[in-house]
C-alpha cells in the first residue's frame, strides 16, 4: 500500500497578509497610525508616512470644522468681492488686473477668514473660486449684453454677409480684449490669492 503525503502549508503561506478593505489583495504595507494592512489603492501618502484612508478621513474631520453657515458666508463675501473687483479692476487695464487682482483676492480671502471665524472647510476654497467667478461675470452682464445686441444689430442691418461677418468679428475682438480677457484674468488671479489665504 502506498500513501500520498499531503503537503503541509509552508511558513510563507501562513505569514501572508491581506488588505483590511480588499481581503483578496495581498499586502505587507501597514498604516502607521492604526496598524491595519492596506493595499496600494487604500494607502495615502502623508508627511508622516503611509496611512489608510480611514485614518486620513478622521484626521481631516478634526481639521475641517466649518459649519453650513460658514459656506453661505464664504460664498456671500466672495460673491461681493467678485462683483466689485470684476467691475472696477478690468477698467484699470493691465495695472488693475495684473497688479491689483492678487491683493484683491487676498482681501477677499481675509474677509472670508474673519466672517467664518477661522473655521476651515474642505470645500470652502471651491466655493470661493465659484463665487468670485460668478461675481465677476455678473458685474459685466451689461458689457456682455451690449456685445450680443451689437452682434444681432449687425445681422439685421441688411449688409452683405461678408460685411456683417467683418463687423461681428470686430465686435468680438473688442469684447475679448476689453471684457472677457481682463475679467477672466481677474477671476483667476484673485481666486489664487483668496484660496491661498484661507488654506
Image: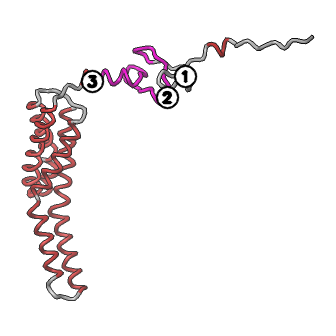
Tell me whether circle 1 and circle 3 mark residues in contact (CB < 8 Å). no
CA distance separating discs 1 and 3: 27 Å
Of helix, strand and loop, which one carries label 2? Answer: loop
Task: Please give the name of the residue rendered at 18% of the width and 28% of the height, measured from the top-left corner.
Answer: 66
From the viewer's perspective, is 51 left or right of 122?
A: right
Q: Earlier in the sequence, mark 1 or mark 2?
A: 1
Q: Quadrant of residue 172?
A: bottom left
Q: Is residue 4 above or below residue 162?
A: above
Q: Is residue 176 above or below residue 57?
A: below
User: Which quadrant of the rendered structure holds the C terminus?
Assistant: top left
Task: Please give the name of the residue rendered at 10% of the width and 64% of the height, measured from the top-left corner.
Answer: 143
Of helix, strand and loop, which one carries label 1? Answer: loop
The disc placed on residue 40 is 2
User: Which quadrant of the rendered structure holds the N terminus?
Assistant: top right
* Circle 1 crowding by C-alpha within 10 Å: few under 14, some 14–19, many from 20: some
Q: In x, y percent, where is residue 54? A: 37, 23
Q: Quadrant of residue 180?
A: bottom left
> For residue 190: magenta?
no
From the image, state whether disc 3 or disc 2 is nearer to you. Answer: 3
From the viewer's perspective, is 176 left or right of 88?
A: right
Q: Which residues are magenta?
A: 31-60
- Which residue does the numbered mark 1 point to in the structure image? 27
Tell me whether circle 1 and circle 2 mark residues in contact (CB < 8 Å). yes
Q: In x, y percent, where is residue 127? A: 20, 41
The disc placed on residue 77 is none
* Circle 3 crowding by C-alpha within 10 Å: few under 14, some 14–19, many from 20: few
Q: Earlier in the sequence, mark 3 or mark 2?
A: 2
Amino acid at each position: 500500500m502506498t500513501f500520498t503525503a499531503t503537503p503541509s502549508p509552508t511558513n510563507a503561506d501562513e505569514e501572508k497578509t491581506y488588505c483590511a478593505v480588499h481581503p483578496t489583495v495581498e499586502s505587507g504595507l501597514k498604516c502607521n497610525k492604526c496598524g491595519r494592512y492596506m493595499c496600494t489603492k487604500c494607502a495615502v501618502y502623508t508627511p508622516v508616512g503611509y496611512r489608510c484612508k480611514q485614518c486620513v478621513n478622521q484626521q481631516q474631520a478634526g481639521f475641517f470644522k466649518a459649519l453650513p453657515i460658514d459656506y453661505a458666508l464664504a460664498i456671500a463675501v466672495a460673491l461681493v468681492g467678485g462683483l466689485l473687483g470684476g467691475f472696477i479692476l478690468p477698467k484699470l487695464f493691465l495695472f488693475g488686473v495684473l497688479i491689483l487682482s492678487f491683493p484683491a483676492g487676498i482681501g477677499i480671502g481675509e474677509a472670508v477668514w474673519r466672517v467664518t471665524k477661522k473655521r476651515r472647510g474642505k470645500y470652502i476654497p471651491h466655493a470661493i473660486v465659484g463665487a468670485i467667478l460668478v461675481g465677476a461675470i455678473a458685474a459685466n452682464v451689461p458689457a456682455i449684453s451690449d456685445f450680443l445686441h451689437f452682434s444681432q444689430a449687425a445681422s439685421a442691418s441688411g449688409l452683405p454677409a461678408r460685411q456683417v461677418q467683418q463687423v461681428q468679428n470686430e465686435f468680438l475682438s473688442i469684447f475679448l480684449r476689453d471684457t472677457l480677457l481682463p475679467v477672466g484674468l481677474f477671476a483667476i488671479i484673485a481666486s489664487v490669492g483668496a484660496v491661498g489665504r484661507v488654506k
